[in-house]
Image: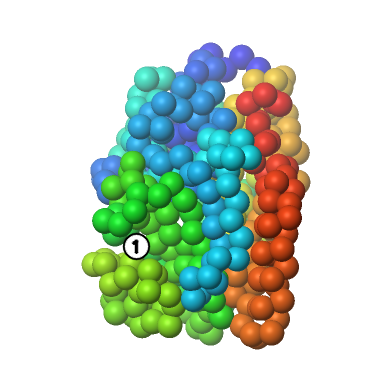
Amino acid sequence: MELSGTDILVIGAGIGGLAVAQILSARGANVTVVEQARQFKEVGTGLQISPNGFAVLKALQLDEALKERSVEAEAIHLRDYRGRKVLSLDLKRHNRRNYHLTHRSDIIEALVCGANSANVEIRLAHRVENVVSGEKPHVRLGDGKTIEADLVVGADGIHSVARSCIMGTLAPYFTNQTAWRAVVPNDAENLSEVVVYMGPHRHVVTYPVRNGQLRNIVAVMESKSWTGDSYTQKDDPDAVQGAFSDFCPHVRELMRQIQEVHLWGLFRYPIAPVWHKRGVAILGDAAHPTLPFLAQGASMALEDAWVLGSAIDAADDLDAGLARFHMLRRNRVRRVVDSASGNAGKYHLAFPPFRWIAHSILRACGAIAPRRILESYDWLFNHDVTSEH
């Protein structure tokens, strides 16, 4: 489909929104991004961009910008909560490259530069209250103004206004898990590794970001209740320190360095059964929210952005392109979401004999056939949407 002269409005200047804006603008569309935040600021913490997501950034010619702001992971280690090694996967040795560890604000900065270079208009402090589909879809802003477009793309996260327009509200359920996020100075070893410490009912993930200057910490604990509803809710650093006080000295030392920590409840949202309706489409977390146990939220948004652009480009009209986009993505994202949901239980084994058996099996597999373990993830990491669509 020829996009020249087509007006496209993207809701949300996150990873998926900025990427799809650049992709559609490069194909000739007039693209505007509206974002409710008043400025791009130091928000969020670390992200993992696996090779499948990196492939999209490379196609957008943003790969060098990412490399300048990130750490390329050389290994992934699983340890028990006492610090004993369970499994080590040497990415570099087994030629698994382009797995990058970055701060969210750094990749957003790169994507903003890419969008600006593609002549995308970005409007901050524009909060969308309502989206209306139809022959001429439009959005209503918080100040009462409306913006019309030929296509509205909702890249506005789990509380998506665009999704509500397409199919109403999706009811999530609490997974009985809460997560703390923090960033601390990386004063110790600048190792290019992701380390997961697995304990009873809890786990900790840590890795370096920002060229090794900082260390990202995600600490997850099972919990029976949750009353908050925000990614920006702050907590007392003493709370996370106390929750992991029986972990190994390295983890406890990382926890002691935390000056500011955010806490949120982990909810499982169903994948939206419908992703488009009369000139309105959704992607990323708006369409298929995922738990963070496979580190694929950012990479799935990047894949979505590329496939949406390619699907529209190859179709006769917008409706056909949006239908093709959904068809191409639905099975893959479902597999990713299901895989992420299944990992939590593997990290949180509590019954000591069961945990010992499971960890012993992992140690044996790692010693005998580490390449085979990495190959079991080839379906995920080797999937390159830029060469397939």
In the rendered image, which residue does mark 1 sit on?
182
Disc 1 marks a residue whose amino acid type is Ala
* Residue drawn where x is 65% and y is 31% of the image: 384
Helix, strand or loop under label 1: strand
Q: Quadrant of the C terminus?
A: top right
* Residue drawn where x is 33% and y is 41% of the image: 211
Which of 93 and 265 lies nearest the eye of the viewer?
A: 93
Quick check: 358 left or right of 122?
right
Q: How is the image coloured?
A: rainbow
Which of 263 and 82 lies nearest the eye of the viewer?
A: 82
Query: Looking at the image, is 36 positioned above or below residue 362?
Result: above
Name the quadrant containing residue 171.
bottom right
Which of 305 and 383 lies nearest the eye of the viewer?
A: 383
Q: Quadrant of the N terminus?
A: top right
Give the residue furthest to the front.
Answer: 367
- In x, y percent, where is residue 301? 55, 42
Give the residue furthest to the left.
Answer: 259
* Residue drawn where x is 42% and y is 54% of the image: 207
* Residue drawn where x is 56% and y is 62% of the image: 78
- In x, y percent, where is residue 341? 65, 64
- In x, y percent, where is residue 241? 34, 78
- In x, y percent, where is residue 347? 60, 70
Quick check: 259 left or right of 53?
left
